[in-house]
Image (cartoon, rainbow, N blue to C red):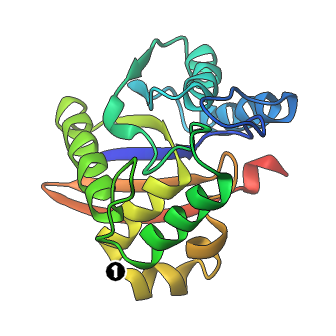
């Protein structure tokens, strides 16, 4: 059995592209890492290549004296790089949430994002059989994975605001893989942030 804790990156700067964490975000990452320390040292820390995720992951790596391992498949479904209007980006975001097969101009459909993330998680679980790992990623792709594993109705009923509000900063989602089957144990928990 492999236990994977998905960590939503901490609060990022309010700019397009690849912003880093705010001072509050750095504190959120530190608190989340300290909370997970009570469960023991994980075997590894993986991260999306985006700066906000890497900076969040570095708090976990520091807490556990591990190196961050980058995996491009853990990136967000869509990332606004500043090209085009914010309104256009947000419209694409909403459409990819409502229509899981819609492929935006830049990025992946909800189903595509879920499949690439699940592929990455499968590889992580295969490398870390019977271990616990931390994976720092993004809210949209985390929700995409949950929708794939649980279905839309179960995801929405378990955490009612998840599809509209997303995963909160440093929200922890825990998955367990037993044989080839994924189980969802916890979704978007923020108790550790007080």
Please give left or right for residue 113 compared with residue 47 in the image. left
Please give left or right for residue 164 compared with residue 138 in the image. right
Seen as rendered, the residue at the extreme front is 84
Q: Is residue 36 above or below residue 107?
A: above
Q: In the image, residue 51 lies at what x, y percent?
A: 58, 25
Q: Nearer the viewer, residue 21 or 134?
A: 21
Numbered label tally: 1
Q: In the image, residue 103 lies at what x, y percent?
A: 32, 61
Category of crowding for the residue at label 1, using alpha-carbon neighbours closer than 10 angstroms: few (below 14), some (14–19), many (at least 20): few
Residue occupied by mark 1: 151
Q: Is residue 8 above or below residue 72?
A: below
- Secondary structure beneath dot 1 equals loop
Please give left or right for residue 27 compared with residue 55 in the image. right
Q: Looking at the image, which residue is at 50% across and 63% down?
A: 92
Q: Looking at the image, which residue is at 26% across and 53% down?
A: 177
Q: In the image, residue 133 lies at what x, y percent?
A: 40, 35
Q: In the image, residue 130 lies at what x, y percent?
A: 26, 39
Please give left or right for residue 122 compared with residue 67 in the image. left
Q: Is residue 17 above or below residue 66?
A: below
Q: Looking at the image, which residue is at 39% across and 22% down?
A: 70
């Amino acid at each position: 059995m492999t236990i994977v804790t998905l960590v939503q990156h901490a609060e990022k700067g309010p700019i397009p592209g690849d912003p880093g964490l705010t001072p509050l975000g750095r504190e959120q990452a530190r608190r989340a890492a300290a909370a997970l320390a009570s469960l023991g040292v994980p075997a590894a820390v993986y991260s999306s290549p985006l700066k906000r995720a890497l900076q969040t992951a570095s708090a976990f790596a520091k807490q556990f004296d591990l190196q961050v391992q980058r995996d491009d498949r853990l990136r967000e479904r869509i990332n606004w790089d500043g090209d085009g209007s914010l309104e256009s980006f947000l419209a694409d975001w909403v459409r990819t949430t409502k229509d899981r097969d819609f492929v935006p101009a830049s990025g992946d459909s909800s189903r595509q994002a879920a499949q690439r993330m699940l592929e990455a998680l499968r590889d992580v679980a295969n490398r870390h059989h019977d271990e616990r790992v931390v994976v720092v990623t993004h809210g949209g792709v985390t929700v995409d994975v949950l929708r794939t594993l649980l279905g839309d109705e179960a995801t929405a009923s378990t955490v009612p605001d998840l599809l509209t509000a997303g995963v909160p900063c440093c929200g922890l989602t825990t998955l367990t893989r037993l044989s080839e089957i994924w189980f969802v144990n916890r979704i978007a928990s923020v108790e550790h942030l007080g």
